[in-house]
Image (spheres, helix red, strand yellow):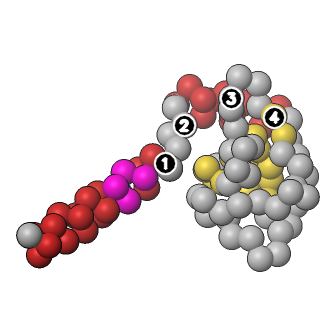
């Protein structure tokens, strides 16, 4: 009985991990992207340089980086190394690199 249970448990753990990974994906709708691009163009920011931080989706920004609000959008933005970065303010993780 134990022999049959191990593969089943392993399969379940694998599928659960895939579900968690998919839940972490952030989808920015085309409407939100338009609002974000227009706001960023109207409110340009000076670029900051962050040593040791890679501009990848999922990377966290340090607390020292000031995030700017975008009206009617749950995310914030900042310009890092001349790239506009969309950030989840709760986790400070990058959800999209716009430029």
Q: Which image quadrant is residue 64 in?
A: bottom right
Q: Residue at x 52, y 31 (%)?
A: 30
Residue 47 is labelled as none
- For the residues marked 1 and 4, what is the alpha-carbon distance in whole angstroms? 21 Å
- For the residues marked 1 and 3, what is the alpha-carbon distance in whole angstroms? 17 Å
Q: Nearer the viewer, residue 39 or 61?
A: 61
Query: Is residue 91 toward the left or the right of residue 25 in the image?
Result: right
The residue pinned by badge 3 equals 73
The residue pinned by badge 1 equals 25
**Mark with earlier residue (1, 3):** 1
Which is in the foreground here, disc 1 or disc 4?
A: 1
- 95 is higher (above) or lower (below) than 4: above
**Mark with earlier residue (2, 3):** 2
Q: Residue at x 31, y 62 (%)?
A: 13
Are discs 2 and 3 less than 8 Å apart at CB? no
Q: Which image quadrant is residue 21 in?
A: bottom left
Are discs 2 and 4 less than 8 Å apart at CB? no
For the record, the magenta segment spans 16-20
Count neighbours of disc 4 (C-alpha within 10 A) and say few if under 14, some if 14 to 19, many if 20 or more: some
Query: Is residue 63 toward the left or the right of residue 55 in the image?
Result: right
- 28 is higher (above) or lower (below) than 62: above
The residue pinned by badge 4 equals 69
- For the residues marked 2 and 4, what is the alpha-carbon distance in whole angstroms? 16 Å
């Amino acid at each position: 009985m134990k022999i049959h249970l191990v593969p089943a448990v392993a399969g379940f753990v694998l599928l659960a991990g895939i579900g968690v990974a998919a839940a972490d994906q952030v989808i920015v709708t085309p409407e939100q992207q338009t609002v974000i691009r227009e706001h960023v163009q109207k409110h340009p920011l000076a670029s900051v340089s962050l040593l040791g931080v890679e501009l990848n989706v999922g990377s966290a920004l340090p607390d020292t980086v000031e995030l700017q609000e975008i009206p009617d959008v749950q995310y914030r933005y900042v310009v890092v190394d001349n790239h506009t970065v969309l950030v989840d303010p709760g986790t400070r993780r990058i959800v999209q690199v716009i430029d």
